[in-house]
Image (cartoon, rainbow, N blue to C red):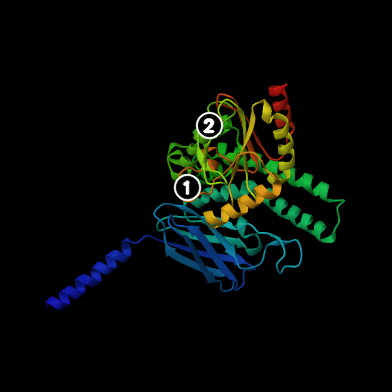
Amino acid sequence: MKPALFTVLAVCAGILSSSAQETFRITGSLKNQGNEKIILTYFDGTKNITNAVDAVDGKFTLTGTAPAQPVMAKLNTGIDRNTYLGERANSMAIPAMPLDVVISKDCKLTISGVAEDINLATVQGDAYNESFNDLRKAEGKNLKEKAELQKNLMQLRKMGVTDGLDDVGKKMLANYKELNAIHKQFIKDHPGGYSSVWLLARTAKEYELAELKAAYEGLDASLRNNELGKNVAARIEIVAATAKSGPAPDFSKPSPDGSYLTLSQFKGKYVLIDFWGSWCAPCRQANPHLKELYAMYKDKGFEILGVASEKTADAASAQVVWKGAIEKDGLTWPQVLNNEQNMKTDVVKLYGVDAYPTKLLIDRNGNIIARWQGSESRELDEKLKSIFK
């Protein structure tokens, strides 16, 4: 009897263990999907997960272990929806947008829509995803228009036609601005929606500091205190610390010869911190003019400190491409690398940099007095002219 009892207990324990593991289930039906693959990707907090299944006559079911906290997942179809510049093989493409899906413990979701527009499909089953249905309704018209404009742009480039590029570019800019306004209004109108805090975290760089604070404070308390809300709060703190006034956070980073340079060692000079990378074409295109400014003002108390961030797999390869770009562009001002081994301080994160190039001007006392994004230099030129007369 004892072995039998032990077996029963072991089986029961296994059942209890299995039931304790949180899962998710997604069933869907997409018109025109056929038997193509459906792919779900997300980060579970420790690693990237990919879950794929072949649809059968447009229908599919995906199951898996749910992460501890709700996460954003991307659902895509195996149908090729990308927009290509040239012939499809090895040509540049604009990836088609996937569907945003929130996965949470024991969620049971149902998806319906059209495969070609999977990013606008409807997801039902919980409040998390219902809030994203509202967002898709708000931005759907603009997203379709954006995709059509991208196709038009690619078609004109394929044909080598330049006459219509200007017109399409203006329409894309107008679409971008309108979509930005829709997003900001959506967040105001849906303070309790999970999609609102996700959207605010994703578009925070589009806000001025005071506007971002107001949008964040307008969210329900539960959203301000979740992981996404905390990310927005951290962004506000960083931007506030590196706004156009106040002390510049100090940092120490390796220079090309291996010695460490510290921002504070340049106190007493006006310092232009230039965030760049060897991969950044606008950054490299701006270097000849920076060389002119450096020659003009370096003997009057002006310094440039380049802070490079390289998109490489490791610190050693970052060193190679960084030093190569410095030499090729003939840069003679101090340079540091933000990819050093065992990096303790991420200067890009410290200064809230999310676009390249970004430049900050520090006064003689170590205070930030100006900040610019992009390669346009007229405001920088005027600022330096007014300082050094």
In the figure, 112 relative to 163: above or below? Answer: below
- Residue 275 found in image quarter: top right
Instruction: Point out the residue furthest to the top here.
Output: 389
Is 168 in front, or is 379? 379
Is 176 in front, or is 26? 176
User: Are the residues tagged 1 and 2 within 8 Å (C-beta)?
Assistant: no
Provide residue 66's location: percent of width, then percent of height.
Answer: 41, 59
Split into 4 quadrants, where in the image is the C terminus?
top right
Q: Residue at label 1? A: 343
Give the SS element for disc 2. helix
Provide residue 239's location: percent of width, then percent of height.
Answer: 54, 34
Q: Residue at x 20, y 75 (%)?
A: 7
Provide residue 232's location: percent of width, then percent of height.
Answer: 50, 39
Dot 2: few (<14), some (14–19), or many (≥20) neighbours within 10 Å?
Answer: few
Asked if residue 202 shows in the view, the reply is: yes
Q: Which mark is residue 265?
A: 2
- Residue 276 found in image quarter: top right
Split into 4 quadrants, where in the image is the N terminus?
bottom left
Give the SS element for disc 1. loop
| Dot placed on the residue nearer the N-terminal end, 1 or 2 | 2
Single out the mark in the foreground, 1 or 2. 2
In the figure, 344 relative to 381: above or below? Answer: below
Is 82 in front, or is 340? 340
In the figure, 249 relative to 149: above or below? Answer: above
Asked if residue 379 shows in the view, the reply is: no
Dot 1: few (<14), some (14–19), or many (≥20) neighbours within 10 Å?
Answer: few
Q: Residue at x 20, y 73 (%)?
A: 8
Q: Amino acid at mark 1?
A: Met
